[in-house]
Amino acid sequence: MEQKKNMLSLIQPTNTPHLGNYLGAMQNWVKMQNDYNCFFGIADLHSITVRQDPIKLRAQIKESYTLLIAAGLDPEKSTLFVQGHNPNHAELSWILSCYTQFGELSRMTQFKDKSQKHPDNINAGLFTYPVLMAADILLYQADLVPVGIDQMQHLELTRNIVQRFNGIYGDVFKMPEAYITKATAKVNSLQEPTKKMSKSDENPNASVWILDDKDTIIRKFKRAVTDSEAEVCAREGKDGIINLMSIYSAVTDKSFDEIEAEFKGKGYGDFKLAVGEAVAEKLAPLQNEYKRISADKSYIEDCMKKGAEKAFKASRKTLSKVQKKLGFITI
Ligand code: TYM
């Protein structure tokens, strides 16, 4: 039998995941867990590039981890882990940082954006963030990395690092590829529909959190920014409506043509309500499952421990190989 390919992706625990994280990433992870040898995790190390409140962070790591399971990832099938529980990430990250150029990191748009947003804390971690991401991916010899479009530049950098490193030392790392689902690669803010939905958006109506209750979800969709027309269709310039159509399509599996036909002659009010209801319905099973499993603290802790062991074991092989290639003495 052909060996399954490896797949890896992580999510930062900087807030509750939003609908963009769910549709752009998590939902795809669940769909693919049977076909790949999967590693999914919580990027706690990445999250401290921006100041975090320790009490909140601890709660959010647990929440995000529990949500992976609630969303349908099976800890028996996939390796579900917290990045910081596996010290191999930080170690490979240091090594790879010696194979990444200052100029390459200076070009990263996320670094530029975050530096602008936090001018009083442009720390070295923010700058080397993509190197840690490369370490996450390469440690597990990932073939595929399912992400939203915003991570594409980081993935390209990872590929450059692989080329450079393998060029010197032979075939040490597999060349990873991004796996992007076009329709949900960039879910946009409900308030500024040309900008991506983001965990750090301060406008409370911009993002739908996947643990929002039904009324909140519907209220946020009712307030979504659209345009001054009254036609539900995907014409240029109708960014707000296109964003809502993409979300509706992702949660109902209806095509854009079907959506246009469904809302022909109806106003935006009806459409927004339908999107809100469909999203709430889609998230309900996940939310119920979250309630059920988060009550069982020892189960979550147990899963974390087992996930950490599996992650350590799987990644140690790569790190040892790297150390040998570099000329380090391993004992
Ligand atoms: P993070 O935590 O910002 O986002 C987690 C995943 O959600 C996707 N995403 C979106 N997709 C569609 N629309 C949006 N508005 C949207 N916002 C976010 C992201 O593309 C991502 O797939 N650096 C990563 C975490 C990370 C990682 C990794 C990912 C750390 N190491 C290794 C892949 C491989 C991040 O901050 O994702």
Image (tube, rainbow, N blue to C red):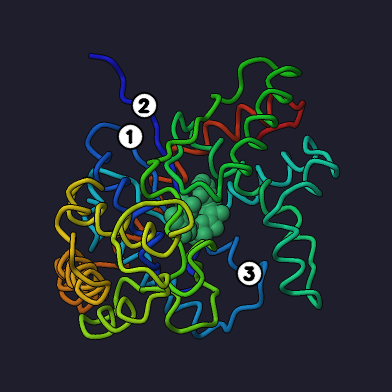
In space, the residues marked 1 and 2 are separated at their CA atoms by: 6 Å
| Residue 226 position within the rendered picture, expressed as x and y whole percent measured from the top left | 40, 70
Q: Quadrant of the C terminus?
A: top right
In space, the residues marked 3 and 2 are separated at their CA atoms by: 31 Å
Q: Residue at x 78, y 35 (%)?
A: 99
| Residue 76 position within the rendered picture, expressed as x and y whole percent measured from the top left | 23, 47
Q: Residues within 10 Å of mark 3 (few under 14, many from 20)?
A: some
Tag shown at residue 134: none
Element class at badge 1: strand
Q: Residues within 10 Å of mark 2 (few under 14, many from 20)?
A: few
**Front-most of residues 251 and 115:** 251
Question: Closer to the N terminus: mark 1 or mark 2?
Answer: 2
Can residue 83 be seen here? The reply is no
Q: Residue at x 29, y 52 (%)?
A: 27
| Residue 20 position within the rendered picture, expressed as x and y whole percent measured from the top left | 40, 60
Element class at badge 2: loop
Q: Residue at x 57, y 42 (%)?
A: 152
Q: Which residue is mark 3?
A: 48
Judged left or right of residue 76, residue 107 is right
Vertical relation: 120 (above or below) 154: below
